[in-house]
Amino acid sequence: LEFLGMAIQPPEGSAVAASVDLLRQIGALDPATDDSLTPLGYHLATLPVDVRIGKLLIYGAILGVVEPVLTIAAAMGFRSPFFSPIDKRDEADKARKALGLAHSDILTTLRAYDGWIEAKKRGRREESAYCQQHFLGRQTLEMIAEMRDQFRTLLASIGFVPPTGRG
């Protein structure tokens, strides 16, 4: 880590220590071997994403749950797709609760996204109706879909999912 001190603007020592601690906590560095990369750390180093998102993606692929994990990881990077107009706040809350799963915001978002994908397959009118009924922002859902595709491409580039299609 001494090489960081030679940078034009070296990072604060506390920032480096916090980063190393995080990498140890998630299992990317092995303190027993002088903080060498673990196999997980090796793969995380190839992904240009936050290490926590990277670990989620890799484990999702390993455990065979890549589809929901792609959505969850993508959704974590954006605001909630749900919106609450001031004049319809109670109605919006009820619509969100109707999609609710296990009192979890992220699982509710996953369910909303999956429902949007199904509605989208049935056509533009169905998609719009679904978004209106559940107070969902189509633009946010589209951004989540794009990020999912980017994450899938990254996982494919390191051999964790097939290059195209669902995996």
Image (cartoon, rainbow, N blue to C red):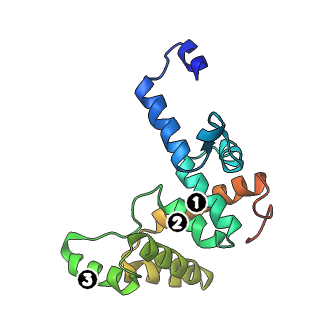
Mark 2: few/some/many CA within 10 Å (<14, 14-19, 20+): many
Amino acid type of the residue that numbered disc 1 sits on in the rendered structure: Leu
In terms of secondary structure, where does tag 1 sit? Answer: helix
Q: Please, is residue 30 above or below residue 59 in the view?
A: above
For marks 3 and 2, the one nearer the N-term is: 2
Relative to 1, 16 lies left or right: left
Amino acid type of the residue that numbered disc 3 sits on in the rendered structure: Glu
Quadrant including the N terminus: top right
Tell us which disc is closer to us: 3 or 1.
1
What residue would you read off at disc 3?
91
Q: Residue 145, position in %: x, y?
A: 58, 64
Marks 1,2: beta carbons within 8 A: yes
What residue would you read off at disc 2?
72
Which residue, as the protein is rendered here, is positioned at the far front? 32
In terms of secondary structure, where does tag 3 sit? Answer: helix
Relative to 162, 78 lies left or right: left
Query: Which quarter of the figure has residue 48?
Result: top right
Mark 1: few/some/many CA within 10 Å (<14, 14-19, 20+): some
- What's the distance in space between the residues labelled 3 and 2, CA to CA? 25 Å
Query: Which quarter of the figure has residue 165?
Result: bottom right
Tell us which disc is closer to us: 3 or 2.
2
* Residue for point 38% across, 82% down: 100
* Residue for point 58% across, 59% down: 56
* Residue for point 49% across, 40% down: 21
What residue would you read off at disc 1?
56
Amino acid type of the residue that numbered disc 2 sits on in the rendered structure: Ile
Q: Please, is residue 83 above or below residue 95 in the view?
A: above
- In the image, 119 versus 60, the foreground residue is 60
- In the image, 101 versus 45, the foreground residue is 45
